[in-house]
Each structure stands twice: as structure tokens, then as C-alpha cells.
Image (cartoon, grey):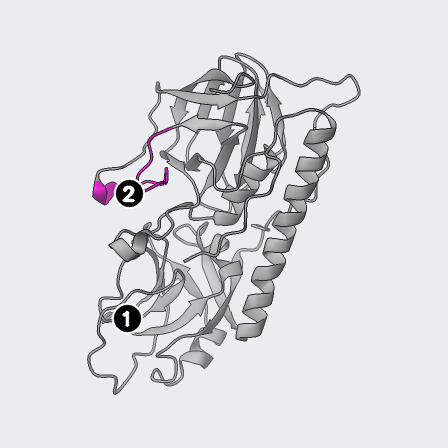
Amino acid sequence: MPATERSVTIKVRESAWLATFQDLGREQSEALGVPCGGAADQHSAAVANILVGNPRTAAGIEIMGGRFSFTTSKPVLVAVTGAPADVTVNGSKVQMWEPVCVPAKGRVVIANAQGGMRNYLAFSGTLVTELFMGSAAPEARMGFPQQIAAGQHLGLRTAYAGFEHPYLTQPLFRLPVPVPSFEHPVWTIDIVEGPETDAARGIRELLASREYTVTAKSNHVGLRLDGPVVHPEGLGEIVSHGVPIGAFEIPHGDELIILGRYRTLTAGYPIVAFATKAALPMLGQARPGQRMTFRWVSQAEAVESHREAQRLLNALETRVQSLFGAINLPHHSRPAPSREAA
């Protein structure tokens, strides 16, 4: 351990409905038949790490529903992102999407998430956790669940030693954080054409004009949506093959499936559309009952929206590093390269 780092113990008091170690997933694992996995909402996970001076790919904690709380043996710098929730430190409300200083023995509570499915908690430094194929992301089918339980003690290696300034109160910093909106009851998701779009006559008009609802059968493999579908005709047998995250799959039943980060092969089902990369984080936040509509965009528009999202993350990363350097808070000296989702 570098001389500037120290060990901190984080005691988990409440573990929500489900809390797991999480990062942005595995690189090159799908060539070996293992899904890339990683945070369902990659944007929120990346921003949480950027806000505490970590690389975007650092391990954090993904929280689903209920209450998650912890105490810490020494001061820590944290950030909470994702769905709007109530976050308190020693009973006082603090802001999400900002760096937050937690004093030694401080108690942090994250609860009452609204409008989305997941929160992301990042600590400045390195959470101590096992890795599978280079990633902290869960892979339960391979015996790597990464679930965090109440009463568990987590280790953190951090160079952060506390920060106080007589002229600074909450919020700690003003940063150009790209915060998504969860306010609308119906989400609009941008999509582009898939390989079997033309074979499903009328699917363009149907997806552009109707509303779909996420069902309770959804899971980490994909969202299952209730709504009208059109089955492609004249395709014959489709050989199973790998597909990108966000593929719109129509199985034999009358439902629409949007494949997530733990998808495997298509099982021979037709793919009639793809969600754009910029839309994937919101899909990762969709909970049962969430309603959504779809908007067709061109490939050029999809690429541009992804580039803009990356530009905003890069700008935030540069600003955080400059600010942390000016006030001697620990940070990584070089931004991690942006990752293209598989």
C-alpha cells in the first residue's frame, strides 16, 4: 500500500433489497462466452466515480430499493448517483450527484428511491473486493454473486484524510454534472433499425406510435415489455448469435424484450431494433410498471448523442481533477479513456 493511503473499515448496517459490488463490466469476456455484465446504468456509475476522483471503471456499490446504510471508521469522500433518493449523513440531508465529505464514525443512509431502479455509491479510493475476469461485477452463474449483506465489513484503501474549510458548506462543490431526468411518467427511448426491421412489416409505425410497459418478469438479462408486437415473416430459421446490449428481440410470444448487459445469445429470435448507446442508462433504471415510448433516429444521430454524453463526462472529469488538485484532495491525474459499451 502506498504511504499516502490508509485502510478504512465500512460497516454495512442495512443492505437494501439488493446491494452488490459493481463496476462497468468485463472487457473481452464475451469472446469466452461470459456476459460483460457491469452497472445497468453505466452513466450513473461512471459519474459517481468521477465525482470522488476515481477512474470511471473503479468498483463501487449498486443499490436496488429499500434502505442502504453504513458507518465508517475514518473520514471518507463519497458520491451517490442514480434514481432520486433521500441521502443523509448523521441525519442531515445531503445532495446526490455531488462529492460528500463523511466524518469518521459518520452514518450514511440511502433510502426512498423514486422514479428509477438503482442507486450508485462510490468511495474515493479502492474498495477491497475480489475480481472475476478482471471485474468486480457480479456473475452469479459462474459462482460470483458479489452480494453485500447487513453486518458485513468492507475494506477501503484511500488517500482521503478528511477535508474542512471554514467558508465551504453543503453543497461542497459546484460541478457541471450531467444529471438525467427521472420526472416524466413516460420515458422516450431513442432507437435505430435492426437486422430484421424490414421483415416485421409495420414494426416501425407500431414502435413509434404505441406505449409499452415494463413487466415484473424483467431481470438483469433483459426488460420484458407489455405492448403490441409484429412477428417477422419469411425469415426461416435464425441461427443464434451474439447481439449488442439494447437489442429489441421478439420471441414467439407476444412481448418485446430489450436485452441488457447480462444477455447471451439471441436464441434465434429476430432483432427488430436497437436502443442507442445514449439511451441505455435509462433502460438500466427501468422498474416494473415504467411506461415508455420509442423514437426512431438515424445512425448519425445515435453516434452524435453518444459522443455528446462522453463529452459531458470528459468535461466533468477535467473539472473535478482541476478542483481536487487545487485544494489537495486525492484524485487520479489522468482521465480514464471512455469505454464503448459492447
Q: Amino acid at mark 2?
A: Glu
Using the rendered image of the protein, determine whether residue 93 is visible from the camera's viewpoint.
Answer: no
Taking depth in this image into account, of 200 and 139 the one nearest to the observer is: 139
Residue 244 percent across, percent down from the top left: 38, 63
Query: How far across and down, in percent of the image, does residue 306 sit?
Result: 56, 61
Tell me what residue is drawn at x 53 percent, y 48 percent: 43
Q: Residue at x 70, y 17 (%)?
A: 164
The residue tagged 2 is 139
Magenta-colored stretch includes residue 12: no
Looking at the image, is 146 positioned above or below residue 252? above
CB within 8 Å, label 1 to label 2: no
Quarter of the picture containing the C terminus is: bottom left
Task: Give the residue at x 55% y 28%.
Answer: 124
- Distance CA(mark 1)–CA(mark 2): 29 Å
**Badge 2 local density, few (<14 within 10 Å), some, or many (20+)?**
some
Q: Which mark is residue 254?
A: 1
Farthest-out residue, right:
167
- Looking at the rendered structure, which numbered label has been put on residue 295? none
Position of 45 with respect to 168 (left or right) is left
* Overall secondary structure of the magenta section: loop
The part of the image, by quadrant, that contains residue 98 is: top right
* Residue type, numbered disc 1: Asp
In the image: residue 144, left or right of residue 206: left
Against 88, residue 246 (above or below) is below
Q: Residues within 10 Å of mark 1 (few under 14, many from 20)?
A: few
Residue 233 x, y percent position in the rendering:
27, 85
Q: What are the residue bounds of the magenta stretch? A: 129-142
